[in-house]
Image: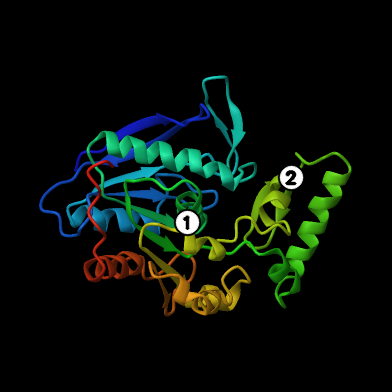
Amino acid sequence: MPVEFIRTATMDGLLLEGAFTPSVGHLMLPIDACLFLHGTGDNFYSRGVLEACAGAAQADGLATLRVNTRGHDGICSLPGRRGSAFGGAAFEKISECNYDVSAWLDWLASRGLKRVALVGHSMGAVKAIYSQAHAPHAAVSAILAASPPRFQHTWFQQHAKGERFREDFAKAQELIARGQGESLIYVAQPLPYIASAASYVEKYGPEDKYDFVPLLARLKAPALLLVGELSEQSSPAFDQTLSAISKIQDKLPLVSAERVPGADIAYRGQLDAPWVRFAGWLKKNPPKPPSKSS
């Protein structure tokens, strides 16, 4: 199957890379293409659940676009019109994902692909929801959010398994107070990675601006959220997520949320589960056709 390696520019002048595979054969689902958003520290060519989803989508006749966001890899240099900038999971601001997602959706629309499923895993799932809550794009017909972690400061602070979060957050605050916000620290919760102190506090601070649950009511496209059973048991980032959504389900007519039995955040041993569930859900809940003006 032919693959085209592409680059696009965001509205704020950064250049991002991706891989596009055109549609082949008969469309089996009521969409034209899928845009895949990677998780923390990953990239468009990472192996794992999004690779499996992309292969299944191609088998269903869909065009696929796997892309980098500015948070790709642990630390990276992002080329841009005005020189390069630090990027990667260590330095990213989630709010800037709006620029990345919009740029890639514009690219697909320029190819005539106007019924797009936005498929995100982990941090990519949060970005899928956040971007469409704050900067909805006419091309998005459906959203699959596989294992989106919550960003809820008080919950992490009070959780029985939140000791390392409390330690890591306090360490980051101390560095910022000393004027060393760009210093890199190793954090263990809600996942192990290297972050700048400023980025960590910006993501996980008490403002909860990246907690996706309150944003669900703002979505204009139908969305399916999946949470792995093992993730709920092992991490505060997933514990009680489905319960929180169920409490406001009457306000979320476009949102469905499901537990995937026996699944961890990476869907190890059942990489096909997210796409199987999403494809079945799409057939039962076909999105509305795009308007003539979109």
- Front residue (pair 111, 287): 287
Describe residue 42's horizontal placement relative to residue 4 as left or right.
Answer: right
- Front residue (pair 250, 102): 250
Return the residue at label 1.
Answer: 129
Q: Residues within 10 Å of mark 2 (few under 14, many from 20)?
A: many
In this view, the residue farthest toward the left is 26
Is residue 68 visible in the rendered image? The answer is no
User: Which mark is in front, 1 or 2?
Assistant: 1
Describe residue 245's horizontal placement relative to residue 102 as left or right.
Answer: right
Spatial separation of the CA atoms under disc 1 and disc 2: 23 Å
Residue 189 % position (x, y): 67, 62
Which amino acid lies under the numbered mark 1 shown in the image of this protein? Ile
Residue 162 % position (x, y): 72, 70
Residue 39 % position (x, y): 50, 53
In this view, the residue farthest toward the right is 178
Return the residue at label 2.
Answer: 198
Which amino acid lies under the numbered mark 2 shown in the image of this protein? Ala
Secondary-structure class at tag 2: helix
